Image (spheres, grey):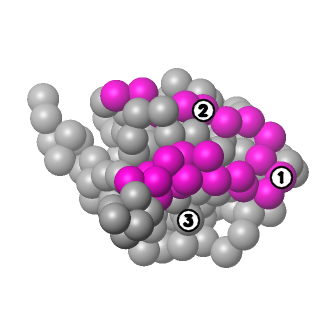
């Protein structure tokens, strides 16, 4: 009986788990994905995954309606974002937003050196200020990216 009750309460606990220094939150609605939340609330997909790596699964398939997610942490909250569209390149983003190589990669450390792993629908930080994020979690980012890559091939 206790085990069943504990299992029923666990999802509720994860939806209200406080993240130290969180400056803004969002409540998940039915059908949300990490990318849709990022677009709706103006947060990079990387930042959303990083800030919530303890509550969002690697492939972002455990979002539940009414779950509260943190969008940014004090001093590490990029709100100047851009949603990738077909044929975007890092050079285009750098030129359009006046971002140096160092700042683009500092704010989006999931982007590989060739910039060939950005995908349609991904939300990137395009601020000219470099943010000091905690260490990049490559496994989490790759799981998120590959979850949404099939949509890139749709025409």
Can you name the residue that lies furthest to the front here?
Answer: 1
Q: Is residue 63 visible?
A: yes
Q: Residues within 10 Å of mark 2 (few under 14, many from 20)?
A: some
Question: What residue is rendered at 52% in x and 59% in y?
Answer: 55
Q: Is residue 108 visible?
A: no
Q: Residues within 10 Å of mark 1 (few under 14, many from 20)?
A: few
In terms of secondary structure, where does tag 3 sit?
loop
Q: Nearer the viewer, residue 118 or 12?
A: 12
Tell which circle, 1 or 3, labels the residue nearer the N-terminal end.
1
Question: What residue is rendered at 31% in x and 30% in y?
Answer: 31
Which residues, given as a range, are shown in magenta? 8-30
Q: Quadrant of the N terminus?
A: bottom left
Q: Which residue is mark 2?
A: 26
Q: Which residue is mark 1?
A: 21
What mark, if any, has residue 33 been given in the picture?
A: none
Q: Which residue is mark 3?
A: 54
- Which of the 4 quarters of the picture holds residue 42? top right
Work out whether 149 lies above or below 121.
below
Q: Position of residue 89 (x, y in %)?
A: 45, 45
Q: Quadrant of the C terminus?
A: top left
Tell which circle, 2 or 1, labels the residue nearer the N-terminal end.
1
Tell which circle, 2 or 3, labels the residue nearer the N-terminal end.
2
> Is 10 one of the magenta-colored residues?
yes
């Amino acid at each position: 009986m206790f085990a069943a009750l504990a299992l029923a309460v666990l999802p509720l606990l994860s939806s209200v788990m406080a993240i130290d220094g969180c400056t803004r939150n969002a409540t998940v609605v039915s059908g949300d994905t990490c990318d849709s939340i990022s677009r709706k609330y103006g947060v990079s997909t990387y930042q959303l995954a990083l800030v919530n790596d303890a509550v969002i699964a690697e492939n972002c398939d455990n979002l539940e309606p009414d779950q509260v997610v943190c969008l940014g942490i004090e001093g590490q909250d990029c709100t100047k974002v851009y949603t990738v569209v077909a044929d975007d390149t890092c050079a285009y983003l750098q030129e359009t937003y006046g971002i140096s190589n160092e700042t683009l990669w500092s704010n989006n450390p999931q982007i590989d050196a060739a910039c060939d792993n950005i995908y349609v629908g991904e939300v990137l930080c395009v601020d000219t200020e470099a943010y000091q994020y905690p260490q990049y979690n490559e496994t989490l980012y790759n799981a998120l990216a590959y979850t949404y890559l099939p949509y890139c091939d749709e025409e």
